[in-house]
Amino acid sequence: MSSKNDIKLGLFVVCAGLVILLGKLGVFGFLGRALWPLLLLLPGVFLHVLVFGRRITPAALIPAGILTVYGLLFGLCNTWGWGLMAYLWPVLPLGVAVGLYEYSLFVSPRSGGLTAGAIVLGVLSVALMFLSILGSGTMYIIGIVLVLAGIWLIAGRSGGRNKWNRGW
C-alpha cells in the first residue's frame, strides 16, 4: 500500500472510532432530542428561499409557512417545556393560516376569498390562544357577558314596546 492510502485508511479508522465513542457518550442522542425541531424549520425556510428566488411555484408557500411556524412552536416547547403546549395549541391552526395567507399574497390572480379565509383562521387562532392563556378565568368573563347580554335583551322587550322593530 502506498503512504497516501495508509493516511486515508488511518483517518477513516480515527473518524469511525470518534463516531462510536461520541455515540456511546450520548452526544448524538442529545443532539437528536434537542435539535429535532430543526427538521421542520429548515425545510420551511428552504422552501421560502426557493419561492422567493423564483425557483418553484408559490403553492409551496403553504407547506413552507406551516413547517416554519410548527418548527418555531416545537422548538419553543422543546426548549422551555412541553407544558406550554396547553396554552400554545392554537398556534397549530395559525400555521395553516400563515401558509394560506402567504400563498394568497403571491398567487397571480389574487383571490379575496383565500385571503379572507386565512385572516379569519388567523384571527380565530389568536382569539383561541388568548382564551387559553386566560384559562378558567375566561369562563367567568364569558358567563358575565352572556348574563349581561341576556338582561339587556330582556330589558329591551319589557314594557310592551318592541325595541327591535324601531331600529337602533
Image (cartoon, rainbow, N blue to C red):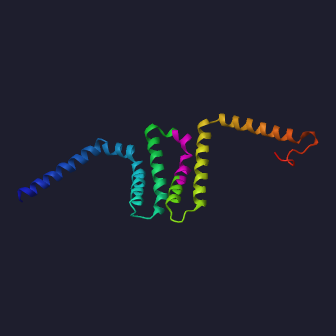
Residue at the spot x=60%, y=40% of the render?
130
Residue most toward the left? Answer: 2
The image position of residue 68, as x and y in percent, is: 45, 51
Residue 87 as seen in the image, left or right of residue 155: left
Q: Which residues are magenta?
A: 84-97
Residue 126 as seen in the image, left or right of residue 1: right
User: Image height check: is 25 above or below 5?
Assistant: above
Residue 114 as seen in the image, left or right of residue 55: right
Residue at the spot x=38%, y=45% of the render?
35
Residue 14 as seen in the image, left or right of residue 119: left
Figure quadrant of the N terminus: bottom left
Figure quadrant of the C terminus: top right
The image position of residue 52, as x and y in percent, is: 41, 58
Q: Main secondary structure of the magenta part?
A: helix
User: Image height check: is 48 above or below 137?
Assistant: below
Residue at the spot x=59%, y=60% of the render?
112
The image position of residue 107, as x and y in percent, is: 51, 63
The image position of residue 97, as x and y in percent, is: 55, 53
Residue 44 lies in quadrant = bottom left
The front one of 99 and 104 is: 104
Residue at the spot x=52%, y=52% of the render?
98
